Image (tube, grey):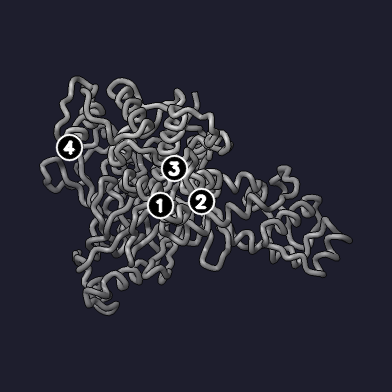
Amino acid sequence: MNSVGRHFNSLFKRFFQSLSLCGLLLTPLSVTALSESALTLRQHIEANLGDYPLSAFGIPLKNDTTLQDFYLNRNFSLAWYNQQGKLTAQARAVIQEIGDITKDGLLPADYYYEKFQATKLLENNELTTNSRIQYDLLLSDAVATLSQHLIAGKVDPKTLAIDWSAQRRHRDLVKILQDIAQGEDVAARINALRPNQVRYFRLQKLLTQLEQRAAPEWHPLATAPLIKPLTGDKRVEPIRERLIYWGDLTTIADENITASSQPQWYDELLVSAVKNFQRRHGLDEDGIIGKHTLEALNISPAMRKQQVVNNLERWRWLAEDLGDKHVLVNIASFELRVIANNETVMRKPVIVGRDYRRTPVFSDKIRYLVYNPTWTVPYSIASKDILPNIQKDPEYLNQLNFKVYDRNQSLVDPATVNWKAITKNNFPYRLVQMPGPKNALGQIKFMFPNEHDVYLHDTAARDLFSKKDRAFSSGCVRVSDPLELAAWLQKDNGISRADIDAILASGEPKTMFLKKPIPVHIEYWTGWVDSKGVTHFRADIYQRDPPLTAALERSLHAE
């Protein structure tokens, strides 16, 4: 007997104390309390135990165990039909919600919408008891699947990227089914399954707006040469149309005159609109329409809609509660934000991992801070990145204040090592960089021990923060002006900025634990709407959107 059969049989033991089981099928029992439909439904479920998946109209259902529990709790009464054989108000509301689920970027077809559209067919007086049962099962399965998708996402992120650790939400699907089938205000109950985050609902609203907004023709524009202010170019006319579509350019009288009399002239009003567009896309706000700006302008509304859909899904992967106070890093926007009671109280530019050493997505808690840290170099970085530098310059280790240890943890004089004879495949040393101005971790690191060995830290290479694209690290997140973040985190510890400066001045490593660990969420969003209603998009630096798009567009019921 497989696990499904054992589970179902154990439920019957609990529910019917006098029941005796034989194999996978039930022995006869009193059914005087069961209606014809309940008896038929019970027999249908029994017939689909074990190696036979529960199905309706020949369609294998996705939630066998959940449906078995659900109907057992109801004594096998139908959930979505009343005694007159008509759909309940809850059933009608559920079907409506399924039809509108595109506002979440999900597919109605995944929830059998085509089967439910013709409600007259579902309520036909000539409909057999067996057909009503199968429609009932199908609708229950649809609600269970839809609920699961709204709670935790349609796609398991682990199937797309091994470096994505999601803390997906979990709920009791049987209880959800019971509440929706029997309760009032189905729309509100389904809405409660969505992430309780205003940023999710802003994206949802944006998706609806994009669906309703008519777009101009969107032919690709050449990305060279660049277009400077107060010059003419035939690409200016379609650029103007696109900026109007996205709301960066308001069609005021002066601009209307230019558009009609000199449609190819890049005037000052249009320059202002381009700067706004650049700001929303994380580009240099110089008003010059160069390669990156043109690439962003070439992304069509349909492509942006899919980007919004992808980011709605990413929100569904997040934990139930991010924390009243938390640190949020968006890898794609190279930004860290500190959130307190739903308000952003601090923003910092960050540097994230290169494409071949990607910063992973995960959540944890900052537990302690290390001032004047040493840096124990990960083996892969020591053998692949640092070894070639040592071989080029014998003084490299001394200049950057590294100490060398052998496998017995004994200190080694680097001058005694024949570095030319060592390769990345036989690197026998551990490198530790001492505290100081050249230390790769800078003056501080923020620790949340994790399987990825990734954390936040300062950096000696602070000039890189002036770059717009900041994917330069080996996976960890480098923070601009990290001491302000440290002071905020340690307020509850009674540590002031003056205290921090004194610790740093000592030059000695010092570890300080937080009284209350602070949640940190390292995420990856390529699109969002801010608190002022402004839409932002970012480049997909790790190319994580295409596989997610493919997974979301794939029907659950494809052959």
Q: Earlier in the sequence, mark 1 or mark 2?
A: 1
Quadrant of the frame with the N terminus:
top left
Q: Which mark is residue 14?
A: 4
Whole-percent x and y of residue 332? 47, 52
Say whether marks 1 and 3 touch (CB < 8 Å): no
Q: Which residue is mark 2?
A: 526
Disc 1 residue crowd, few under 14, some 14–19, many 20+, Cα 10 Å: some
The quadrant where residue 451 appears: top left
Q: What secondary structure is marked by label 4? A: helix
Q: Which residue is mark 3?
A: 82
* Residue located 42% across and 49% down the image: 316
Q: Which mark is residue 193?
A: 1
Q: How many angstroms separate mark 4 from mark 2 (CA)?
A: 50 Å
Q: Nearer the viewer, mark 1 or mark 2?
A: 1
- Looking at the rendered structure, the kind of residue marked 2 is Thr
Q: Earlier in the sequence, mark 3 or mark 4?
A: 4
Q: How many angstroms separate mark 3 from mark 2 (CA)?
A: 46 Å
Q: What secondary structure is marked by label 1? A: loop
Q: Earlier in the sequence, mark 4 or mark 2?
A: 4
Q: Is residue 61 above or below residue 148?
A: above
* Residue located 26% across and 41% down the image: 379
Q: Earlier in the sequence, mark 3 or mark 2?
A: 3
- From this viewpoint, which residue is outermost toward the front? 32
- Looking at the rendered structure, the kind of residue marked 3 is Asn
Q: How many angstroms separate mark 4 from mark 1 (CA)?
A: 30 Å
Using residue 363 as the reference point, say whether residue 351 is left or right of it.
right
Q: Nearer the viewer, mark 3 or mark 4?
A: 3
The quadrant where residue 10 appears: top left
Say whether marks 1 and 2 touch (CB < 8 Å): no
Whole-percent x and y of residue 14? 17, 37
